[in-house]
Amino acid sequence: MGINTERDMEANLQIGPTDQGFVRIFIEAGGVEIPMDFEPEEAEEIAEEIRAAAETARKLSK
């Protein structure tokens, strides 16, 4: 299974700051909860990767 494998699954995604100064990405799916904490700099790198992926996807859909 890879990034291009489609799945029929619902998930909830929350993103926000923690009281300890981290950025948390919290995913809940099928009764499983996955909290992932990142330093602010790491979160900015992830945001840049998401923006780049969105730009590439936009070009591919044209």
Image (tube, rainbow, N blue to C red):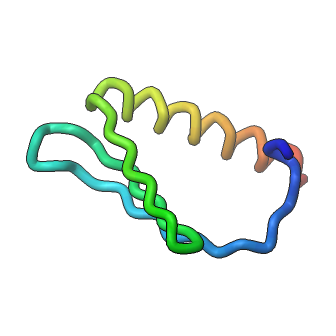
In the image shown, does 35 or 32 lie closer to the viewer? Answer: 32
Task: Determine the residue positioned at 14% across, 38% down.
Answer: 21
Say whether residue 40 is left or right of residue 46: left
Q: Position of residue 37 (x, y in %)?
A: 32, 40
Q: Position of residue 3 (x, y in %)?
A: 79, 44
Q: Position of residue 36 (x, y in %)?
A: 39, 44
Query: In this rendering, is residue 14 above or below 41?
Result: below
- Given the current orientation, which residue lies at the most extreme left position? 19
Say whether residue 61 is left or right of residue 14: right
In the image shown, does 51 or 10 lie closer to the viewer? Answer: 10
Q: Position of residue 56 (x, y in %)?
A: 76, 39
Task: Determine the residue positioned at 63% across, 34% down.
Answer: 52
- Given the current orientation, which residue lies at the most extreme front position? 31
In the image shown, does 58 or 36 lie closer to the viewer? Answer: 36
Q: How many marks?
A: 0
Query: In this rendering, is residue 5 above or below 40?
Result: below
In the image shown, does 20 or 58 lie closer to the viewer? Answer: 20
Task: Determine the residue positioned at 71% across, 72% down.
Answer: 9
Query: In this rendering, is residue 50 above or below 41?
Result: below
Task: Determine the residue positioned at 86% across, 48% down.
Answer: 4
User: Residue 43 appears in which quarter of the rendering?
Assistant: top left
